[in-house]
Image (cartoon, rainbow, N blue to C red):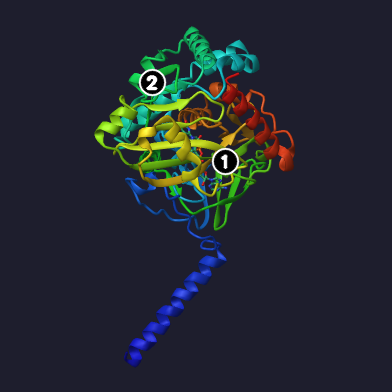
Amino acid sequence: MTTRHFCDHIISSLLLLVHAVHRISKGVILAQQIEHTGSFYAATANQTLDRPALSGDIEADICIVGAGFTGMVTGLTLSELGYDVVILEGAKVGWGASGRNGGQIINGFSREIGYIEEVAGPEGAKALASLALEGGNVIRELVSRYGIQCDLKYGSVLAAYTDKQVRSLGETKAMWESRGRNGIEMLDRRTIRDHVGTDKYVGGWIDHKGGHIHPLNLVQGEAAAAESKGARIFEQTRVVRVDHHLNTPVVHTEGGSVTARSVVLAGNAYLGKTVKQLYPKILPASTQIIVTEPLSDSLAKEILPTDMCVEDANYVLDYFRLTADKRLLFGGGTVYGGADIKDVEKALRPNMEKLFPMAKDLKVDYGWQGNIALTWSRLPHVGRLGKSTYFAHGYSGHGVTSSHMMGRLLAHALHGDASHFDVFEGMPARSFPGGQLLSVPLSTLGCWWYSLRDKLGV
Ligand SMILES: Cc1cc2nc3c(=O)[nH]c(=O)nc-3n(C[C@H](O)[C@H](O)[C@H](O)COP(=O)(O)OP(=O)(O)OC[C@H]3O[C@@H](n4cnc5c(N)ncnc54)[C@H](O)[C@@H]3O)c2cc1C
């Protein structure tokens, strides 16, 4: 190396150092880069884009915290309406539940319509019933409008282990139909075998308006659509504080801030204690997924002949489907509090093999877990803080459709029509009993009790 080259080298190293110190002092690279969990979805994602972190103080019409389905559909809808939207994501687009779920499009809510009528009254129940298919419709509309490649398929099966579960599904179907929701077909012991290759189920139903998707590709497609409409998305940008009491709320991140006319909190189970008023209302719970090696065509046809997704009617349920390249994706389990378990395959394989002994030699290629957000009522927790900060979360395990519906309702509320949003906001939202210390053990106990009842068939 010549003396000149040596000096150039020293100068450029010093410049890099000064730049790094400047970024650290702004808080931009203090945190480690957070990548997607090691899922099948991350391995087969359409995009591997890295977006910048927020650095400095900016303004926007709307600032959204969280780039999952809720945040993305809100942001996309508002961008389509001409708003200046900024979306802040602590990790990457779809890093949370939206990019790592079972991909099942399940219509309706995590509570039966009878309960909804009790807490929301007849008019509230009517409004919610009219939204039962909204989330699935929004998914199909966005996939078609923006040409999102996410392996969208039609049809979901809800499978029953006991006659009691079948009777309860029949009653639920009748209640939905009396409120205008159709597309559900009951299955008996014989006809469910046309869709699921196991003799463990005694019946169930097909929701022909259900279906399944590659969720990470869906949320990434929605992000690209929002950006095409002008939305700005910042990744690796954790929000640390939200001043929602101000007339014009301010969202603070590790490296800057966004002052916005309105704020939407869409961090769901991963919001943690960022906003202390919301923390007691939702309980994170982790659920796990494994994905096998690709099946032969004949084995795929034997296990899931009509390529629909399936979940069972138990309290702690199993859910499964084929991926586009014909792997068996099998999920289940619930750990209250959201802690990761050590060995996902060991936890899920026995249930998979009990249902499908013919799958016992299949190698598992992927295993991961993620957090859902439970509410005490199992209905979404939705509302406002201060004058113009909105939140929606707590879909209690069935959020693929609910998050899409809620994204639309949030956007409509911010655009001036809060009629449906207000119905959700008006529903009671209890904190979990036991507070910070006891909510997890108490919920675990309750879950154990309901699982025992399922096992005993009572
Ligand atoms: C393993 C698993 C399987 C599931 N399977 C199904 C299924 O098959 N069908 C179904 O209907 N539902 C399923 N769900 C539930 C469903 O995925 C969720 O309800 C839904 O995706 C929630 O979307 P969301 O946008 O509200 O939240 P998320 O997708 O969790 O997104 C929240 C985002 O906010 C970000 N964030 C949080 N706090 C901050 C902060 N302070 N600053 C910046 N960013 C922040 C997070 O990083 C995250 O990316 C499953 C969930 C899991 C975990």
Residue 328, label in figure: none
Name, please, the residue furthest toward the bottom: 3
**Circle 2 sits in a helix, a strand or a loop, which is it?**
strand
For residue 397, side relative to residue 156 (left or right): right
- Whether residue 391 is visible to the viewer of this picture, yes or no, is no
Relative to the observer, which residue lies in front, 388 or 292?
292
Q: Position of residue 419 (x, y in %)?
A: 55, 21
**Circle 1 sits in a helix, a strand or a loop, which is it?**
helix
The amino acid sitting under disc 2 is: Lys
Residue 269, label in figure: 1
Q: Residue at x 26, y 37 (%)?
A: 296
Query: Mark 2 — residue?
Result: 209
Residue 197 occupies which quadrant of the picture? Answer: top left
Relative to the observer, which residue lies in front, 144 or 185?
185
Relative to the observer, which residue lies in front, 29 or 232?
29
* Marks 1,2: beta carbons within 8 A: no
Name, please, the residue furthest toward the left: 297
